[in-house]
Amino acid sequence: MTIAAERPKSIILQGGRHAGIRRWLWSVAALVFLMVVVGGATRLTGSGLSITEWKPITGALPPLSGAAWAEEFAKYKASPQYQLLNEGMSLGQFQFIYWWEWGHRQLGRFIGLVFLAGFLVVAFRRLLPARQTVLLFGMGLLLGLQGAIGWIMVASGLQPGMVAVAPVKLTLHLTFAGLFFASVIAFATALTPLRRVEPARGRGMAWLLLLLVFLQIALGGLVAGSRAGFAFNTWPLLDGGLIPPGSQLFAQTPFWENFVDNIVLVQFNHRIGAYVLFALALWHAWRMRASVPGSGSARRATAIAGLVLAQSALGIVTLLLVVPLWAGLAHQALGFAVLAMAVVNATRTEQAARA
């Protein structure tokens, strides 16, 4: 009996049966990736608080007349961001930031509709076993929760004295986007049959790398939320030291607030996280190439190491240039590309271990 014949039939046959479902899921993943980039642009242009209400249905229509624009502008003028940061802004300037936030919300609605349409087709035509259909339903709930978290995040920036959203809530919003993105990619990858039997090697490290990528994205969210990237714009040291002279990692009370609001610790943690992730990715790639050369596991491990290297270099460039729009967006986008590769690697490694 050949090796291929010994593999479970589900792994061999599901590729042809579920090609349409896979295309749908990869399309959703691509839309979420685009959403992350648009969300980053919305944040970096200061546009996220331009729409001060959450109207899931009627909010899909933008202002269509001069009076409607004046009404929206008046609502924004009542916000702390306008009064403390943007007082004197013209209507044209307001429209610029409004369209960024409106586009961000419309893309979110579109993703929800695309996912819902695909799910209904899968559910009513019974294209997948009940367990997998229920899992898709849970992913839909996660997507809906992500939308609600988005509004909670915006609402935090509309509180008195605030000119931006709360860092923790921005991080939560980004992390949940990553969770949904990862779940879609994992599902699509699991429906894709293995082309050949792979050695069940590096399973623990694959999951550890995925966990560290998630952690690094969360730390990056805290950097973005606290605007820590606009300070200490030197590398490899922070303004001449491992810790900037005269600064403290734990200067605030209570203790936990340092991890959110102390920009010294926030940036320090993100840097250390990058070093640890890069070191482990390199070690994993070396080990896979040495133990199972030419295998899918070795190629994926090498790809992850290369992506982490590119992401680290881009992060340094973004810092040294004091976060220009193009670099900030590229850094966020490449971070999700690393996440996608780490998810594929962990899913494939798990498949190999169970085959």
Image (cartoon, helix red, strand yellow):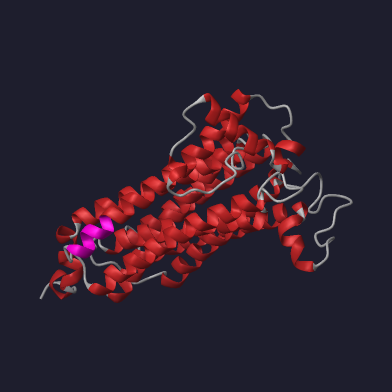
Q: Is residue 119 magenta?
A: yes
Decide if residue 332 is on the left or right side of residue 354: right
Quadrant for the N terminus in the image: bottom left
Identify which residue is drawn at 67% across, 34% down: 321
Q: Residue at x 53, y 39 (%)?
A: 101
Q: Residue furthest left?
A: 1
Q: Residue 244, position in %: x, y?
A: 82, 50
* Magenta-colored span: 118-124
Identify the residue at horizontal 74%, vertical 31% (top origin).
Answer: 87
Question: Would you place residue 179 above or below residue 87 in this image?
Answer: below
List the single residue furthest toward the front: 67
Does 5 sit left or right of 263 as displayed? left
In the picture, measured across the screen, residue 112 lies left or right of residue 149, that is left
Q: For residue 316, say whether it is visible.
A: yes
Residue 202: quadrant of the picture: bottom left
Q: Position of residue 145 (x, y in %)?
A: 47, 61
Residue 93 placement (x, y as % from top left) = 62, 26
Residue 20: image x %, image y %? 20, 53
Whether residue 278 is visible: no
